Each structure stands twice: as structure tokens, then as C-alpha cells.
Amino acid sequence: MTAVTAITIEKKRGAASNGDAVLGLILVAPIVLTMAALVFFPLVDTVWDSLHRINPMQPGTPFVGVANYTNMLSDADLGRSWINTFIYVAIAVFAETVFGILAAALINQVRVGRQWILAAVVLPWALPGVVNAVIWMWIYQPGAGLLNGILTVLGLPFDNHVWFNDRASAIVAVSVVHIWRMMPLTIVIVLAAMQSIPDHLYEAARIDGAGRLKMFTAITLPLISPAIAIAMTNGTVAAFNFFDEAWVLTGASLDTRPVLIQIYLETFQNLHFSYGMALSLVVTVVSLLVSLIYVLRVYRSTRFE
Amino acid sequence: MRRFVLSSVALAALLVAAPALADDAKPLAGKSITVLLPSPQGATIAADFEKETGIHVDLQTLSWDDIRPKLVTALIAGSAPADVTEFDWSWTGQFAAADWYVDLSSAIDADTKSDIKGSSIFTIGEKLLGVPYTNDFRVMLVNKKHFADAGITKMPTTLDELVADAKAIKAKGTVQYPIGLPLSPTEGASTSWYLLTKAFGGDLFDKDWKPLFLTPDSAGYKAMAFEAQLLKDGLVDPASTGLKDSQINDTMFAKGLTSIMISGEPGRLGQYSDPAQSPAVAGNVAAILVPTASGTTRSYGLLEALGIPKASPNQDAALAFVKWFTSKDFQIKNYANGVLPTRTSALDELNKAGKLQSGDALVEESKYVEPLFAQGTPTWYPQFSSAVNTAINGVAKGQMTVDDAMKSIADATQKAMTQ
């Protein structure tokens, strides 16, 4: 009797388990199918196409192996645009992270009207990149630009100064526009993490005699580090995909040309489609590898906690 | 009674025949096509065409720089971006090699081809890939009042006179930067350099596509050095390193902030003469022949045409639009929208009627218009142009010498030719 009951229970469990599995499969099927159709298939197709010569001006699409990848090594313009891109990534990720955390910490102190401050802060991120770039183009304008106007009023010799005629100032000027657009996202992510820290941790630290700086370094920073990693990953990917602001402000100028503009020129101007595909894949891999550094760091800290 | 019966029969016959007659007059009535052109275009184009042919037109306009990516993405995917599209002279080599456009050589009659001389720029072998609709060649646009204020009575015919006049205008204090010259990494910077190369008496390549701009005594080299010198002398705004030709036209020349557009577009004369559109310069702008080193003017054509993608499902209706848009009557009418006719007959008629702004100069300059590339636009033109404007931008910013710039253009061209 006991054995029969046990078998019955086991059968019911099995049936329930199968039912759960089927339900699980049904629930994940839409996202798996969507990802397969819109991400994995195009990705594999792009990899395959990047191993061929796809140029509408030449007949056929012969297999060329890794020629599109090896050609990158002798492309001087590409080399320069990679250097520009790495500079953008370094400046943007550093500035967005440091100033984003500081801004989030400041907003976290505000008790009244925080939502209005957040709404205002998020505005540049909500605007399209092209709109932000056009606004900043007016700010940087040599004649009637706001920036030159302010500096001139302060007695500095910046009347008719052209910010994009010098590589260093051009890169910084273009980076500022990108940081202006992307930093609000870092603020929102970090602020959400800060608000999830229990108050009693700060109360205990205060009782132990910890000051504000100590509490920030010993409690806030460690507890928001996963959020910082997410924000940095997002910032890194966005900086590698940097296009709009550089295109609107300085066009195809070699001084400020990021790798995505190089891809655009190769693909749509020169019609070297498979070379453009190979370049896109390399950008994807490099940005993922750089992002992986932050992600692995968070993963480790999460597992060890 | 008999009269009534006869009248009724006649009326019935008329009612039956009328739609058939209408169909004969408008055989494609009821069809719909899409047309993609650069902005701005006349507001009544679609309605006028539909009224005449019964074909409905969905006219889409984009800025000139945005059209090419839209065309290329659709064409590479095997679909038609529109039934009729813009077809720039500089795309001819690439688009012919890609075999994306319908051959119109048999659809366009010999008289039209003869009347529209620029058709040859869009002809590869025996194939006519586009019918030119806007006659864009280069003249020099000047603000006559600025010249008069500086005490200049005779317009320049040589480059030395041009520089002397610009210095006189600057010295008078009328404007800070008398010469409008794009130096940004955009097509406008390239086309200005091509014109100056012609003005210095040279060409870009020989018949074997060997660069003719590498030595300091070559025209191309002198043209680049000339541009650098204009900038150094304070005759060109340093901010031009970030400005397209259209921006210099709209924000400087149209506002009276600069006096000379070296590479002027004749089509803009209408805009500059209209007090509503250009209150600061209306009545003061004129076209003059392009000054050269020798004093004998030179220019080249940058025509834009209409083409029909092979993937278009409405090629017959599209062809009707191309024919209508490039007809003499419409070209004369379309001049009011700033589009200079490509038909010699239309140009002559407008000039005789006194409607062509600076008509004598335009008609005279049109006699000196050459193709930029005698062998036809090469497939690698975009890479060449990109190398040119990037080099000009580098020289203007002081990051490259003229010598390095010329070598970088030649290297990039060589690389593009071998790809």
C-alpha cells in the first residue's frame, strides 16, 4: 500500500514537473524566437557575409576568407579612428562614472522635489543625439556661440575662437556632448542603487563614529558597485557606438572621426559592404570584451558576498 | 420624336466614349508612384503632374546628403527606394557598375538628348542612366554692393584680381571675411578645389588616371596652396573648417556677411534675388564668370538627374514623370523654384524673356562647362572626393602641409583604384 502510494505521488510529481517544463518552454519561446530571428540569425549571417566580398560594383560574392579582417591592419584612417574611439571611451566612461556618482549622491540628499530634479536631469538623455548635438553646435559656434560669449565676457581672448580647429579641443568638445547625453542614465542607475541601501547601515556607522566620507567609501560605494558596473558597461557600449554627435559637429573630420563613422563611410560611401560588416563585428567584440571586465568584476563580488 | 431619339443616342454614345477618350489622353491615370528628390522642391509638383497625367505622386524630399544612404540601403537589398530618384553626377560610376538603374537611352528621344547636353555625363557606354533636371555648373557669385563700396568698378577676371578685390573689401571694413569657401570634410570643399584646379589651368588626372596634382607647379597643388593662403590672409573665415557649402551660402553670403562665393551655384540666384528670402542681399547679387590664372574662364558641370531604379514596379508611370519633369515647359516653370534648366532651349527662352538672373553671365559660362572627368565619373569617385576634402580640412587646420595633402589624396586614390 505504501509502495503504491509512493509510486502515485512520484507519477503526480513527474506530471507536474513535465507540466512546469512545458509551461516554461512556452513562456520563454517568444523571446528565444525573437532573439533568434532578430539577433542570432543576423549575427551569424553577418559573420558569414564578412568572409565574402560583397560589393555591388563587382560581380558575384566570392569567398575571401579573413581578407576583410587582415585589410584592417593596413587601413591608416581606420587606425586613427580606433585611436579616437578609445579616447572617447576613456573620457566618456571616466567622466560619466565619476560625475554621475557625485551627482547621484547629491540628488540622494535632496528630500523635497527630487522627482523634478530627476526629470530635469534626465532630459538630455531623453533627447535624440542629433538634437543634443545641434544645441551644442550653437553653444560652440565661433561667432555668436554661447561658450565664446561667456569666456569673452569673463575677459578671456575667445572671441571667434574655433573649437574644432584643434584636435585636442575638438575631441574634448565632442566628448562633452556625448557625456552630457549619457550621464543622466548613470545618475538614474546609481541613484536607484543608493536608495536601496538600508538606513540602519548608516545609523550603525554613525554610532561607530564614521564620518560622511567614511560612510560613502565603506557603505555606499561597495553596495552600489554592481550598479556602477552596469552603468559603466552601458557607457562603454554607448561610447563605442558613438556616431550622432561626432557626425553633426565635425562630420567626417579625421581629427574626431570615431570608428562607427569609418564604418559608415566604408559601407555607404565606398559600398564596401563586407568590409563594413567585418568592422562592425570587430567593434562589437571589442566593446563586449571591454564591458566584460566590469561584468566579471561584479559577478565575482556578487558570488563571494 | 425622331430628333429626341437621335439626341438620346448621341448623348449615350458620348457618355460611353468619354471615359475611353479620357483614358487615351491619360493612359496611366490611376497609377501611383513615389519620387525621392532633394529638398526643397516646388510645392505644387505632385498636384500639377497628377492634373496632367492622372498619376498620383508621393513626393518625398530629403537633404541632399541624406539621399544617398537611403538609396544605397534600399538598392543593395534589391528594393526600390522610390520609383523615381535623384541621381547625382558623382554617383554615375558606382551606380552603373552596380547596374541598379534602368537604361533610358531608348525611352528618351534624340531631340531631348541633344537639347540636354549634360546627358552625356550620365551615359556609360550606350546606357543613359539619368535625365538631367538641374543645371548645376559653377560660376562665381558676388555681392555687387560690397565691391562698389570698396570702390571696385570692374569685376575680377583673374585670380590675382580676385584676391586684390577681396583685400580691398576687407580693408574697407565692409565684411571681415570677404571670400566664402567651404573647408570642412564635405563634398562642397572638394568641388571648390576642383574648380580652382581648373582655374589654375589644369586637370585632376591624365587619360590613364594618373594624378596631375602632385608637383608644386601643377594646378591642383597651386589650388590647394591658394586656399591655404586665402585663409592665412584672413580672407576666409577660419570657422569654414566646420561649414558645408550650403551653410556658407545660407548663413554668410545670403546675410551679406561675405562678398564672394568662389564656387557659386547658379540655381541660388533666384533665392538671393528674392527680398522675402534674402532681404540682406536681394538686388545686389550677381553671377560673374569664374576668374582664372589666365583670365579665360573655365567651369565644370555638377548636374543632377532623375533615374528609375530597376526594382521599381511602376517603371512606365515613373518614365512619364521623368519626361514631364524634364520637359521644356516644366523646366521654364521650375526655374521659379531655383532649379536652373538643363535644356538649352529653356535657358535661351528664359534669357530672352529677361527672366534669367545674371542671364548673360550664365549663358556665357555655360559655353565653358567641361566634364570634371573626361573619361566619365570613376567608381572610386567617393573615396577620391573624401580624400580631397579630408586633406583640405587638414591643411586648413594647419595639421598638414600642402605637399602632404597632395600625397595623401594620391595614395587614397591609388588604394581606391585597386579595391
Image: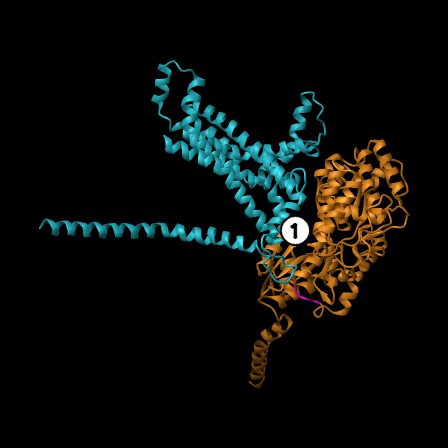
Image position, residue B333 (x, y; %): 73, 58
Looking at the rendering, the stretch of residues picked out in magenta corresponds to B100-104
Image position, residue A119 (x, y; %): 47, 32
- Identify the hue of chain B: orange
Image quarter hosting the N terminus of chain B: bottom right
Image position, residue B8 (x, y; %): 56, 80
Secondary structure type for disc 1? helix
Residue extending farthest to the left is A1
The image quarter containing residue B418 is bottom right
Question: Observer-nearest residue: A269 or B304?
Answer: A269
The image quarter containing residue A241 is top right
Residue B188 in view of the camera = no
Q: Residue at position x 65%, y 58% from top?
A: B85
- Identify the hue of chain A: cyan
Q: Is residue B401 magenta?
A: no
The image quarter containing residue A49 is bottom right
**Badge 1: chain ID:** A
Image: B116 above or below A207:
below
